[in-house]
Amino acid sequence: MGRLEGKVAIVSGAGSGVGKEHALLLASEGAKVIVNDLGDNADATTAEITSAGGEAKSIKANVAEWATGESLVNAAVDTFGDLHILINNAGILRDAMSFSMSEEQFDEVIAVHLKGHFVCARAAAVYWRNQAKSGIEVPRRVIHTSSESGLFGGPAQANYASAKGGILTLSITLGRELSKYGVTTNVVAPRARTGLTDYIESMAAPEDPTQFDVYDPANVSPFVVWLCTDEAQEINGQAFIVGGSGIWWMRNWSHQNSVKLNGERWTLEAIDQHRELLFAEIDTGLPKFEAPPFS
Ligand SMILES: NC(=O)c1ccc[n+]([C@@H]2O[C@H](COP(=O)([O-])OP(=O)(O)OC[C@H]3O[C@@H](n4cnc5c(N)ncnc54)[C@H](O)[C@@H]3O)[C@@H](O)[C@H]2O)c1
């Protein structure tokens, strides 16, 4: 008996890479899956699930379009009777240094990632709120996909890092809005060899097939699927880097120090005078790109 028997899930961008592995593992744990992607690779994932005895349906649609959210949620409810899990995963890269980036490169990435995550989450939120209002309260899950670029700021990725950083805050906001309807929302930043990263030589599969393949995208899915189980109900608004054999729980934007005048507005001169106090013992350089090492 799978851990997700009776659950219905949507996975965006599930035609390849990390999203495909999420869809396969969800299905093998008993969930019925709406497999979303842009093209025929959605059908290939669906065929793999059904040939292994699972249940899935492909919906080929662009998550950057407003109507896609509703069409994915309707497909889940009409085909499988409910919706419990949304995994926002679809993504693209259009890397360039900020001074070389075009408007199109910026807009495309924001649209697929940030808007694409919101479009699907909004449609799910509408359905889940209506369900709760009619007295049906069961655990619901949103897992968003960010990136270490979104956590720390990645050079040549002003578009992608902004979208992925926005997704971190979007998740917390949705967590605050929807927890009263049984919904938790969390973020995973994967590390995996996929269509987006297969140019990175250090992520290549090991030559010795008996060695653990650290960057196999399937390594990311067990934690994502675990977050979807009823056992993860108290975990809400959190972010994790997941890859290889590692899970890193991440926290950011903590209060560092403060100075306060006695009921007066600051002046530039007063800031000069308090500068030592405000910045005492603080590293005021760029925040560290603190990606945790694998070993
Ligand atoms: N691979 C990594 O190491 C890594 C690191 C950080 C973040 N991520 C994130 O993980 C997610 C999955 O990426 P991946 O690495 O598996 O890459 P991938 O290219 O293998 O998968 C992304 C999938 O999303 C689909 N897609 C793209 N635009 C879409 C749209 N508008 N609507 C629907 N589907 C769309 C693509 O067709 C593709 O199948 C992305 O959000 C990516 O930014 C991956």
Image (cartoon, rainbow, N blue to C red):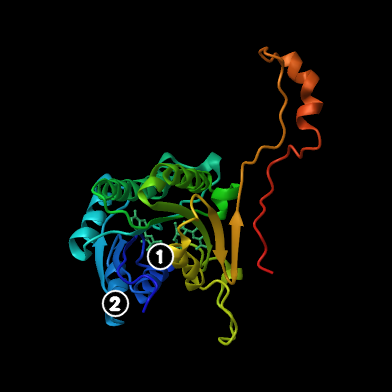
The amino acid type found where label 2 is placed reads Gly
Instruction: Give the image quarter of residue 48.
Output: bottom left
Q: CA distance from mark 1 to mark 2?
A: 16 Å
Residue at numbered disc 2: 54
Judge by depth and name the residue closer to the eye, 156 or 289. Answer: 289
Mark 1 or 2 closer to N-term?
A: 1
What residue appears at the point 77 percent right and 31 percent down from the top-left corner?
279
Mark 1, ligand 1, within 8 Å: the answer is yes
The mark lying in front, picked from 1 and 2, is: 2
What residue appears at the point 56 percent right and 59 percent down from the top-left corner?
241
Residue found farthest to the front: 135
Give residue 89's mark: none
Judge by depth and name the residue closer to the eye, 240 or 290. Answer: 240
Judge by depth and name the residue closer to the eye, 159 or 171. Answer: 171
Question: Crowding near pointer 2: few (<14 within 10 Å), some, many (20+)?
Answer: some
Residue at numbered disc 1: 19
Left or right of residue 195, residue 251 in this image: right
Judge by depth and name the residue closer to the eye, 217 or 5. Answer: 5
Residue 104 location in percent, x, y? 40, 43
The quarter of the picture where the N terminus appears is: bottom left
Q: Is residue 26 above or below residue 206?
A: above
The quarter of the picture where the C terminus appears is: bottom right
Q: Is residue 53 above or below residue 276?
A: below
The amino acid type found where label 1 is placed reads Gly
Quadrant for ligand 1 reads: bottom left
What kind of element bears circle 2? Answer: loop
Left or right of residue 186, residue 76 in this image: left
